[in-house]
Amino acid sequence: MKFHTHILNNGIRIIHHQVPSRIAHCGLVINTGSRDENASEHGMAHFIEHLIFKGTKKRKAHHIINRLETVGGEINAYTGKEETCIYSSFMKEDFERSLELICDMTFNSTFPEHEIEREKEVIIDEIISYRDNPSEQIFDDFDELVFRGNPIGRNTLGTPVNLKKFTREDIIKFMIRNYNTGQMVFSSVGDIEFQRVLKFAGKYLECIPENRAPVNRKPVSGYKPAIKSVKHKTHQAHCIIGNMALDLFDRRRMAMVLLNNVLGGPGMGSRLNLALREKTGYAYNAESHFTAYSNTGIFTAYFGTDRERLSKCRQLAHREFSILRNKRLTPMQLKRAKRQLTGQITIGWENMENLMLALGKSYLRFNRVDTMEEIHRKIDQVAADEVLEVANIVLDPAGLSELSYY
């Protein structure tokens, strides 16, 4: 797998992967997210992601929507804790149209006052809708429990109180501080020659004024495990057990990915799924997640069950944690786990939109991208002792926090 890269004079990085397909994908990944907000700006990064669809110096909101839809394409965006991404899918002949639109939205949005006020109501409704879904809200609440006092613990949507205070000046101030050319990557995947990608990148991206300000994020420290239960008017109980975990640059990160996959990954044969669903029928959904950030990480094991089975499910989860802390994976178990993870990643990269986003984020964070062969090799190099070491760090009972809705 071959990747082409280039750095524009203003610091914006370009990465491209050419594949034989009529459909192409591209996106601008920006190294800023909800973690980069001040307390008074909580929700700002996500708010801006909405507002860039509402008008530019030369387009009204409906012109933005129609620019790609009229040729069968799609444009979308998302905001995470550490990145914002504006991306699109389209017929390969519409590459310039797509790139120009993404640039216009990102760098020329005008943020009309009436659109600002209207979108506040839209997002407040989104927040209310989110709160009505406890199986989703519990993850944000658990982040706050683990990272309390740090911006990374706050949810991306913000609060109605904060949103109502935002002004156009606040929006522009946040973008000036955080939308820096040195912290941007334009990523594309499609049957487009790299020289053509560079031609249009030079036309629409190189004219952006240079700003290479570094990202300064508050370190995460002072973690104290906590146990919290919250009454909810729902039939089902929800529970998360977890801990702070490894960051993006930790040498043991692949071992942590492998451990998470064995414990509660997407496969039906994961240990949590077997213990809580297949063998007992106690839970419909049992899973675990590992998310690595630039200087911290988080591990979560989640399950939903009937209230009267909450205690039993908790015991079964801790039993699986104990086994992983005390029993090294056998050679056969390790081989099977590696094969499964390798297959999952390979299949995931067959989705070209996912691949485009993965390339952009990897180039943004590490200034390089591993080929599939290199990823396979890193997985193959993980030793059983590494998995055991990570399990004893992340699954240590003394370090686990717990949040339950009942």
Image (spheres, rainbow, N blue to C red):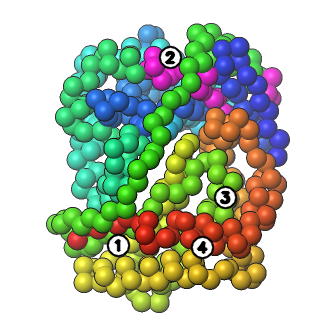
Residue 305 in picture, x, y percent from top left: 32, 77
Q: Is residue 10 above or below residue 82?
A: above
Q: Residue at x 78, y 65 (%)?
A: 380
Magenta span: 175-195
Relative placement, left or right, of 402 versus 360 is left
Tag 1: Cα neighbours inside 10 Å, few (<14), some, or many (≥20)?
many
Which residue matches tag 1?
Answer: 304
Residue at 79%, 38% in the rendered image: 3
Q: Are marks 2 and 4 in contact (CB under 8 Å)?
A: no
Please name the residue shown 51% across and 80% down the image: 322
Q: In the rendered structure, which disc, 1 or 3, sits on the residue that comes first in sequence?
A: 3
Residue type highlighted by circle 2: Phe
Single out the residue that lies furthest toward the bottom: 279
Q: Position of residue 362 (x, y in %)?
A: 66, 41
Residue 404, quarter of picture: bottom left
Between residue 159 and residue 323, name the one nearer to us. Answer: 323
Numbered disc in front, either 1 or 2: 1
Question: Marks 1 and 3: which is nearer the front?
Answer: 3
Indicate which disc residue 252 carries.
3
Q: Which residue is mark 2?
A: 107
Q: Amino acid at mark 1?
A: Gly
Question: Disc 2 to disc 4, how far (Cα)?
Answer: 43 Å
Distance Cα–Cα, label 3 vs label 4? 16 Å
Task: Say which mark, if any, is on residue 262.
Answer: 4
Marked residue nearer the N-terminal end (1 or 4): 4
In three-dimensional space, the C-alpha distance between marks 1 and 3, rounded to whole angstroms, equals 30 Å
